[in-house]
Image: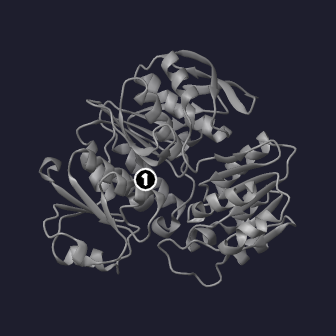
Amino acid sequence: MSLEKINKVYFLGVGGIGMSALARYFNSLGKEVLGYDKSETVLTNQLEKEGIEVHYTDSPSRIPADVDLVVYTPAIPSDLEEYKHCWGKGYVMKKRSEVLGMITDDSFTLAVAGTHGKTTTSSILAHLLKQSVGCNAFLGGISKNYNSNVLFTENAKNTVVEADEYDRSFLTLHPNMAIITSMDADHLDIYGDHSKLLESFELFSSQIRAGGALILNKKLEDKLSPSCDVITYSITEKADYYLDNIEIIDGNYVFSVQAQSGLISDIKFGLPGRHNVENAIAAVAVADQLKVSHQEIKSALESFKGIKRRFEYIIKQHDLVYIDDYAHHPEELKATISSVKELYPENKITGVFQPHLYSRTRDFSDEFAKSLDLLDEVILLDIYPAREQPIEGVTSEMLLRKVTIKNKMVSTKTELVAELKQRKLEVLLTMGAGDIDKLVEPIKNELLN
């Protein structure tokens, strides 16, 4: 299918972070874009302001007969009436990942993969290139520098994409260069076991185009055998790109990177967390390979404002700090909580966590509990089901029983704000990939009153 011949595109799940980026892309080309989502959000409201028609009722009659392409996501339930209608009527239907593969076929593609870290890494990389050689980008989060999840540069030769391992979506991509940040066990509802997930990453690395390279976290070296050139990076040991030194000055990390082209020194990086410094080093490796100058790299890292819901400061006062984060895997929770403890070692840290998916909570309950034990006090919300049906015995109460710290409880979403208001908070951390983000503003407003 030729993208040039597409005039009207319909999105099933247009408000998703990856789907909305594609919708904005087609809209920027002057195509007619419309779609369905189950609920109105800040993002869908922004899409409507940009001229994209969005509706929120499952109504096949709202789908025009002359749609050239229907784009859908695996998150769409198979019993959705619009989904069934599109298949029944013979519309051309493509998964989001397939369309992304089509868009990037004729571009110099830089793909960022990993079970965690890919959104931050791809956003840092996109900013580095946007500020230097230029790029287009499809991101899995809202970049604060551009208030968008998609970037355009006229006549750009490079395209940065987030390569999603869920449902093996990243196997539709054939990048020129790729980053793999992590390969921890996840999505076992899809893969069955960790070995199958690793096989999928092996396949992804095999699809790097001839003459390309894989930028690989050094701790993963013994887990992959790619046929292309491998360039390693690390925050803990010597590699092709590695952390030379690091310190915290006025709440910011200041560090140096030993690159293949020489030392890039005294970078002031405003995004908290050592895991984010590691993500920055991966992005530096790609930029350095593309001959971006040291000064351009340093300047871009220092001007990077971060991504919404990735270690995002909501309140930052002397007597109260509130940070919101997308963390939803045990390793992500561990990294986020450890970073907060490093920045605020003398303060009590209260964590609110909304588990995401029954299967993930079941498969990693022990690991989740161990990560949550790093907190001083924890409040669990009910599990966010997303695409899943409940699993008997898998609840937030089950997870809470495995947490060993004394100050712990389960709360409903409706009771959470009042519960937090009556506590003496020092550092508050909300975490999760479900709809906990809808509580951020109410929490902020109540705490500041």
The reply to whether residue 329 is visible in this rendering is no
Q: Identify which amino acid the numbered label 1 is placed on.
A: Asp
Q: Mark 1 packing: few (<14 Cα in 10 Å), some, or many (20+)?
A: many
**Side of 100 relative to 220 (left or right):** left
The front one of 375 and 144 is 144
The quarter of the displayed image where residue 251 is located? top right
**Side of 220 relative to 236 (left or right):** left
Colouring scheme applied when the structure was drawn: one colour
The front one of 189 and 67 is 67
Q: Give how far across and how far down residue 262 sits, in percent.
A: 55, 14
Q: Give how far across and how far down residue 195 sits, in percent.
A: 51, 59
Instruction: Report the quarter where the N terminus lies.
Output: bottom left
Residue that label 1 marks: 164
Q: Give how far across and how far down residue 218 sits, in percent.
A: 57, 36
**Side of 266 relative to 63 (left or right):** right
Q: Secondary structure at mark 1?
A: loop
Q: Give how far across and how far down residue 390 sits, in percent.
A: 56, 81
The quarter of the displayed image where residue 199 is located? bottom left
Name the residue rendered at 52%, 65% in the picture: 193
The reply to whether residue 202 is visible in this rendering is yes
Name the residue rendered at 77%, 40% in the picture: 343
Asked if residue 350 is positioned above or below residue 300 in the image, the reply reads: below
